[in-house]
Image: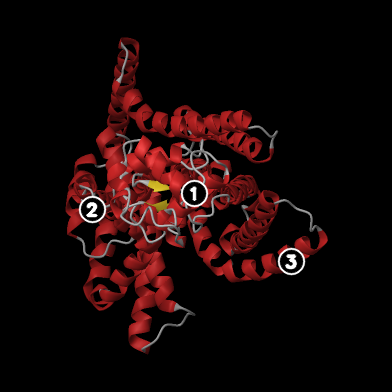
Amino acid sequence: MRKTVRLVILLLVVAVIYFGYSAWIDSVAIYNIGAAQLGSSIWNTKITEILDYIAKNDLGFKDTAGLVKWMEANNFNEFISSVANNGNTKMLDAISPAALTNVEFIKALTELTKGEYVLNGFMAANSLLKTLLDPFKMILVGGVFAMFVPLTKQLLFGTVIGMKSYMKNRQSNVLYNYQKTISFTEDLQVKLAEGNFDAVKADYAAYSGLAFKPEFLNIMMDEICSVLIKEGDLTVFAEAAKVVTESIKEMYEKERRRSINGRGDELFFDLKRGYEYCATGSKYSIAYHKALQDKADNNLGWKIYSLEIFKFNFFLVAMFIPAVIISAFVGGLINGLVSNLTGDVRTLAVAATFFVSWVILTIIAHSLMIFRNEQYKNIKNILVKPAIIFYSLYVLTFITISAGIVGVSKVNIVAPGSSAQIWVWFSAVAYLVLSTSLIFYVIATLVDSFKQHKTLSKKLLVDGIILPMIAWTIATVSNFMALYGPDGHSLQSIFAAINGVTLVGFWIYLSISSFLINNLISPNMARELRKAVEADALKNAKAKKSTKSTKAAK
């Protein structure tokens, strides 16, 4: 899950580069004065506006005759039109068409306004430089879609694709694939109970040949692989393998009855079987992880919630429409009671009303599903703490999204000339995604850690929870101070800089920290690692000797 969060950040970076480059090369980089680009349909209107401003304020000339004299004095004689000396000629008509697209002439004209009008950009829309730079947009958009498509599949359609695959192969599974997998797991269970390292290793090599491999079986085989590599104790998987075998048998019996009867005996039968086959958070995956635990302690509660939290997204989809209805009612009520809210505060109130309503409804539905589950009837007490932590993090996530929307909404992206604020808008989008991803990274750390291990390591605690929460706190406080704190451009710039440096700095650190920690090993650390390996080898040798002695005694 943490890998997914990192991919989202990388996608954001590539998208910002692409959209930023495209918007920059097509707007900001083109010669422009405000919303008018050189050579556009409103360019002449803008030049007329500048001429009128200069004449009105007597900044260089007052009329057409004065304009002609100014042009002569500044060596722009070639730009004086043939009708310039007629009595009633407008100032714009006194300028030749060539002058209207001449950069030096336009710059000289805008300089007379003393900063009221400024010529921005550095190239024309039909210039050779623009033609040369345009193709790079295609290269960047290719990078965006190369990442966007697989990431979208993973985030939104991974389960759906797995369910579709299950439905497609249903008949062959019932005919023989189920039975082959059941035979495989029963044989594996015996070898795991014996701790037969070589036999389990051979079974792992043959595992790829199975056609029916549900996700909970994949999870077990991946963990067995890790133990094989470390030459650890395989007997810990014996009971879990038995549970996996019973789960596959149960799936097979349900499918067999459906084939005989012509229809399933449960509501949404096909969807349930597909979900059980491909989802990490299915009841069979949870049953496998429960079997690995020695007792029902707090770690089991964390492990269960780490798996059940995968269903949170489904409840988010289900609660979207109710959240819209409730937020519309509550938002209208707040708007009627407090009518003197400022623009940013009103935006925050509207966004928070919807997002907080949405996440609270989802939390209620998700928690009811878990705490009313008969499987957890006797272990509800160990589920309370992880439930509070996970749900609090989701509330923080949606509050952060609400705050980020305020910054994004400050830029009217449809207004004329708003392209000049492109980096302001992208900075707001970056804050929205990066700050929200900090909370998601904490959630992902908890999920990945307790899903795969029994405890949270010190390294993960620091890198995955403490540092992201510190970065989130600094970024959120500085963002709110920039939006609602003391007025003053310098203070707001300072808070914005703190916000940006914190967010970007953390994600850069995170991208290189794992590489440095895994590759920079001191002599003392190397000695400690060798001692740990030797201790494990000695422990395994004693365990094997004890097993052989027991068998000989029998």
Q: Any mark on residue 63, and which?
A: 1
Mark 2 vs 1, N-terminal side: 1
Residue tagged by mark 2?
Answer: 138
Residue flagged by tag 3: what amino acid is it?
Gly
In this rendering, does residue 120 appear at all?
Answer: no
Q: Position of residue 132 (x, y in %)?
A: 19, 46
Q: Position of residue 171 (x, y in %)?
A: 26, 78
In this rendering, does residue 163 appear at all?
Answer: yes
Residue tagged by mark 3?
Answer: 332
Q: Residue placed farthest to the right in the image?
A: 337
Q: Is residue 374 left or right of residue 336?
A: left
Residue flagged by tag 1: what amino acid is it?
Asp
Residue drawn at (35%, 61%) of the image:
158
Mark 3 vs 1, N-terminal side: 1
Q: Quadrant of residue 187?
A: bottom left
Residue drawn at (59%, 31%) of the image:
495
Cα distance in 3D space between marks 2 and 1: 48 Å
Q: How is the image coloured?
A: secondary structure
Label 1 crowd bin: few (<14), some (14–19), many (20+), radius 10 Å? some
Q: Position of residue 337 (x, y in %)?
A: 82, 61
> SS class of the residue under badge 2?
helix
Nearer the observer, 29 or 489: 29
Q: Any mark on residue 489, and which?
A: none
Q: Position of residue 312 (x, y in %)?
A: 53, 59
Cα distance in 3D space between marks 3 and 1: 55 Å
> SS class of the residue under badge 3?
helix
Cα distance in 3D space between marks 3 and 2: 45 Å
